[in-house]
Amino acid sequence: MEMRGMNMSRHDEFGGSTNKGPVQEHDVIMRGRRLLDITGVKQVESFDNEEFLLETVMGFLAIRGQNLQMKNLDVDKGVVSIKGRIFDLVYLDDHQEKAKGFFSKLFK
């Protein structure tokens, strides 16, 4: 299963953002290569059981692994929890490479 474009920001009825206040912090906490808790997530661009692509307040974050599943999604707080076997985490500076298959190009 693949999902695309899950927007993490909240908007009022006039299209303006309701997230007022300081810039949200971004943390990545990994527990035993089996569980990731990520804060500061603006949007889930895409995901499947081998790869997640998240837009965070500090740039795009790609997560690659095996049997990956979204364990928790808190849209209001910008928190995503992912479980599965984690292989690697990469921040993508060039947004053109963000399409699925980025890692297959990288690790040929």
Image (tube, rainbow, N blue to C red):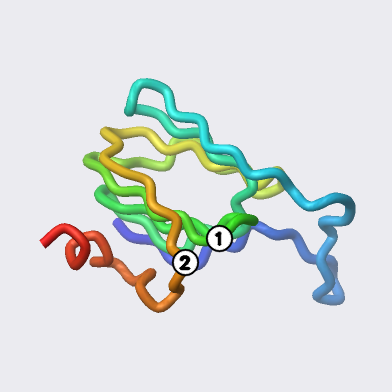
Residue ID at (47%, 64%): 45
What is the distance, in whole Å, between disc 1 and disc 2 at their CAs? 7 Å
Q: Secondary structure at mark 2?
A: loop
Q: How many marks?
A: 2
Q: Position of residue 75 (x, y in %)?
A: 65, 49
92 versus 72 height, above or below: below
Work out whether residue 82 or residue 56 is closer to the camera in this orientation and state it. Answer: 56
Query: Measured along the vertical axis of the image, is residue 75 above or below residue 92?
Result: above
Do callouts 1 and 2 mark residues in contact (Cβ within 8 Å)?
A: yes
Taking the image as shown, residue 65 lies to the left or right of residue 82, namely left
Q: Position of residue 56 (x, y in %)?
A: 58, 55
Q: Residue at x 86, y 76 (%)?
A: 14
**Foreground tag (1 vs 2):** 2
Q: Quadrant of the N terminus?
A: bottom left
Q: Amino acid at mark 2?
A: Asp
Q: Can you identify the residue that label 1 sits on?
A: 59
Which amino acid type corresponds to the residue marked 1 in the rendered image? Answer: Gly
Q: Residue furthest left?
A: 108
Secondary structure under tag 1 reads strand
Identified at 35% across, 21% down, the residue is 32
Instruction: Report which quarter residue 106 is drawn in.
Output: bottom left
- Choose between 65 and 90: the one closer to the eye: 90
**For residue 93, which numbered disc appears in the image?**
2
